[in-house]
Image (cartoon, helix red, strand yellow):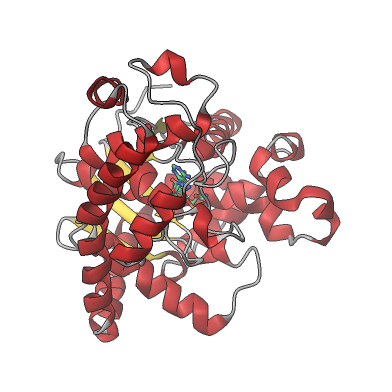
Amino acid sequence: MSKTAFTPRVFSGIQPSGNLTLGNYLGAVKRFVEMQESGIQTIYCMVDLHAVTVWQDPEKLRHNTRELAAAYIACGLDAEKSILFNQSQVSGHAELGWLFSCVARLGWMNRMTQFKDKAGKNAEKMSLGLYAYPALMAADILLYHTTHVPVGEDQKQHVELTRDIAAKFNHDYKTDFFPIPEPVIDGAGTRVMSLRDGSKKMSKSDPSDNSRINMTDDADTIAKKIRKAKTDPEPLPDNLDALKDRPEARNLINIYAGLSDQKPEAVIAEVAGQQFGQFKPLLADLAVAKLAPIGDEMARLMGDVAEIDRILGKGADRAAEIAEPILAKTFDIMGMVRSR
Ligand code: AMP
Ligand code: TRP
């Protein structure tokens, strides 16, 4: 078996389920933009087929998909440089997702911690799609022969499952057709925590709006949420080790580092000795300076929904052009007759 060299290609996606957060921005979108500028082909998706693994109000899903597209663009993604589209407009995702659900093993799916977290004690009442979703995510990635997948820390296990699916497919069909993609998880923002509880991930779905900063929050709301963020009475130390048991403090340092493009080590050296009464206003100013213009631009873009839909349609055409021969070859490898 010869080893195929794959051209580097980036793919990532975010669910259009509302409330894009600072965690999505620092963990994902900001890094999507950096990769767009690196010269590699980049494909970024609004994964609406994933969103419906839990019930979505149809009007809200349509709105949230367009709003996520607006967020991508407002954060610096450029539809000329990157392929931007919503997943359901390229049918190959669902088709390859089915094929991969026949490659993935139940034992592998049973180890997925995100399903356990989301389903909790109610697993019996969850949709089959929520359980099967990592096979669809593998299809999203491999449909484009993707080599690099920028994601936050919480998606690492799903990218590893994607690697297992690619390797098993290649092994079972004695081929080297699919690449083994690499997760790209780096920077200070790979795991942004809740502003109310430093042991919980900042999440779109947290019932408390004060636990997160939404990309649509205005300047006053951003500043207020940071002022109210849970902290402790100690001043900031001069090294990160001393923050080991202070998750809320560590989280604010990480957020500052992510927003200012610095390493957390450099931030802690700069703010050593400060009380939160001093540090929080600095962080609030920085967050407002970085995020408020993005929110404003999103609102402006949402004023022309037809233009957003045009961008998504064109992106889907370009994505389908890459996906179709890869899907056709997959069917062929598996022995499906193709005669039309
Ligand atoms: P989701 O909102 O679950 O569709 O996540 C979209 C992307 O944002 C994925 O790459 C996640 O890993 C990333 N992400 C979501 N929440 C966070 C967080 N709190 N910190 C860092 N990255 C996150
Ligand atoms: N599962 C990811 C999340 O919930 C979103 C996602 C779907 C994704 N398909 C993907 C991320 C492919 C990267 C690549 O955050």
Quarter-of-image position of residue 5: top left
Point out residue 19 in the picture as x, y percentages from the top left corner. Answer: 46, 64
Q: Image point 70% across, 35% down: which residue?
A: 108
The quarter of the rendered structure image containing the N terminus is top left
Point out residue 251 in the picture as x, y percentages from the top left corner. Answer: 44, 35
Q: Is residue 67 visible?
A: yes
- Viewer-proximal residue, 283 or 168? 283
In the displayed structure, 213 sits above or below 244; it is below
Point out residue 82 in the picture as x, y percentages from the top left corner. Answer: 22, 55
Q: Is residue 180 visible?
A: no
Q: Image point 25% across, 62% down: which residue?
A: 292
Total marks placed: 0
Quarter-of-image position of residue 78: bottom left
Quarter-of-image position of residue 276: top left
Point out residue 69 in the picture as x, y percentages from the top left corner. Answer: 32, 67
- Viewer-proximal residue, 160 or 289? 289
Q: Image point 15% across, 44% down: which residue?
A: 37
Left or right, 152 with reference to 269: right
In the displayed structure, 176 sits above or below 322; it is above
Left or right, 102 with reference to 138: right
In the displayed structure, 203 sits above or below 7; it is below
Q: Image point 70% across, 40% down: which residue?
A: 109
Left or right, 269 with reference to 25: left
- Viewer-proximal residue, 195 or 102? 195
